[in-house]
Image (cartoon, rainbow, N blue to C red):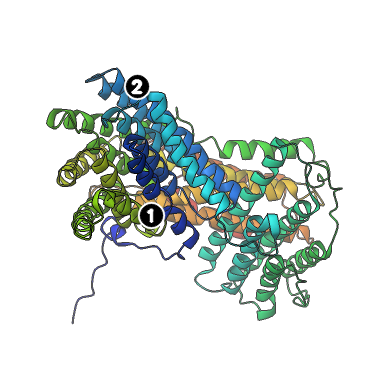
Amino acid sequence: MPRAARALPAWLAHPLRWQRLPVPWAAVARGALCAGPLLGAGLATGHTAAGVLAGLGSMLAGVNDRPGTRRTGIVHIGLPALASALGMLMGAALHAADAGWWIVAALFAVGFVSGAGSVAGPVRSTAGMQMLATTILGAGMPLPGTPWGKALYVLAGCLWLLLLRLVLRPPRPTGGALDGERAAVATVFDALADALAAAGASGAESARRRLTAALDRADEALRLRRLTSRLLRRPARTEELLLAERFTAATALCEASVALLWEARPLPAAVVESPRRFADALRTGRSPGRLSAPETSSAARRAFDRALLDAAVAFARTAPTTRPGRPGPAAPEPLRPSLARRAADAVVRRTRPGRSLVEPAGRDYGLRVALCIAASAAVALLLRADHWYWLPVTATFLVKPDLGPLFSRTVNRFTGTVAGVLVFAAAGQLLTWTGAGVWWPAVVAGAGGALLPFATRHFALQTVAITLMVLSFVTVGGASEAAAERIVDTSLACGIVLVVGHLPHLADPRRRVGQRVAAALRATEDFLRHVLESAPGADPTARLTLRRAAYRALAQARTTAETAAAELRPARDRTPDWLTAVTAAERIVDAATACAVRLDHGARRPAPDEAERLCQALATMADAFEAPRHRATGTPAPSVDLRADPLCATLTDVAAELERLRGYAGAG
């Protein structure tokens, strides 16, 4: 009989993955109006260096031009823009000082900071990467001008794209000034409807994860809106307060829906469509209309119907519960000090384990980037001292550990660079033949800028767009022979990154993934402890905060685990099944949410020793994931009894998921 086809290993299949995303036409228009016109303006006025630097800044800003509200765009583009200008200032200062081989030491230091910043979140990670890239370009590109002048030109290019983002926008819908924030909250209701439609099916868990991501994006949009109001000392308007209350209602509805998903039973169409009616109401300004009829088949369904009614009341309200002019929505009822402190500590702790520059994961990331950049800069200075910058710049965009598996990015970078060089050479010949003259690099840069937003679907395509733009810049700068050299330099950079990036200590996923998983488990423990120990009738604000913190930490752990699973590792390298462990932890939070709903509706409350037993089990597993080498030395973590209590249905599901997780953690 024929043998079944073997699936490609993850490290080999990852380079072929292609994201299916809608075409961001507004971003395409902005990209076409950035690098190309700025480079053309420099050619027209005779200030080619200024045009190149401003075009470079707009290209880096274009990489960060992603969908979102205006305020998220300001943060996601503005912070990396400042870092890019700082990097250009440092690099140009090194170039002006004729630092020679001291450049290698300087790039090692900047590379360490940039790599360590990978654990601090995506925006700061991108800022660190672009700071390192502009430091290298400032130190290596032979452009005239003072360091401050070069930095200001790069910053001006970034701000030009940011200005276009704020000005060139589609007509505002009914939401008016809050259109972006309304769309973000409406997406939460749409994701909730999709999750309810998947109840009882195989895609329920992935739908719940998409719901969590939508909640995070909406929360970020509203928090930035409130922060802007505070900075401008502008009182909150009625529309803002109403939208905040509707998002609060959406959060409560999501908690009840998670309990419904946990029951794993298909839901009636009327229940599934009810959240979508709220999404349509946010987008159109009309009433949600008729919602599903209530029923009392289970505690989760009763909680869902109650949350649905509360959401309907929030949408019917024309005046907020807080008087306009105050800084935000009405404060909840005072929490007990211990619960309030626990919620605050959990949220703070969510941003700290595994995300500090001085912790093991940050040090490993920093050393990995610093060694790759220093090695590539040293090789480049030995081979080609006049145009050495391309090799370490290529390594910069490859070696960042949080941007994807190293082997996948290396393959796609090389493929994209070769394709970009060939397209650039063909476009140059064609445009020169058609009479474009000296303007053809600006035309190619404009085409690359227009392609850049679309190219986020695949790293190789993004590399093609960036290669077109960078070759346009260096051609205008006087290095017309640079295209062929780019392929050689990219090949060397890929080889260096593959060798240095896979050194045993720097490539060990146990340190960076284990810390993220441990942090997620501790956030899960905080939520579970609060659910099991809070008094009946306690204010739900702390519980919702802790649940969101747990899901957010788990999402970060999942992203890191997915990257580690697709890395190229030795065949005998036995690492824990991180993804399965994260999935089990997600199910614990789901089970704890269902447990909270049952407790709210009169279920038997567990005894304190039962609650402590389960929470201690989670803490033990977190310690086991954080220090896997400690387990390997023969000192196992203490075992915790996880027997389920048949008289307490609220603990049975949690205990079952904990028992499953313990097998992956090796904690018992």
- Give me the disc on residue 442: none
376 sits left or right of 578 in the view: left
Dot 2 lies on which element? Answer: helix
Q: Position of residue 562 (x, y in %)?
A: 40, 53
Mark 1 — residue?
Answer: 452
Q: Label 1 amino acid?
A: Leu
Q: Which residue is mark 2?
A: 93
- Give neighbour class at mark 1: few <14, some 14-19, many 20+ (Cα, 10 Å): many
Q: Position of residue 457 (x, y in %)?
A: 38, 60
The residue closer to the viewer here, 36 or 345, is 36
Let me know if residue 403 appears in the view. Answer: yes
Q: Is residue 407 above or below residue 630?
A: below
Question: How many numbered callouts?
Answer: 2
User: If you read the primary sequence from the N terminus, does the residue marked by circle 2 or circle 1 appear first?
Assistant: 2
Report the amino acid beneath label 2. Answer: Ala
Q: Is residue 84 visible?
A: no
Relative to 482, say whether 101 is above or below: above
Residues at marks 2 and 1, CA–CA distance in whole angstroms = 30 Å
User: Relative to 307, is 401 on the left or the right?
Assistant: left
In this image, 3 relative to 33: left or right? left
Residue 9: image quadrant is bottom left
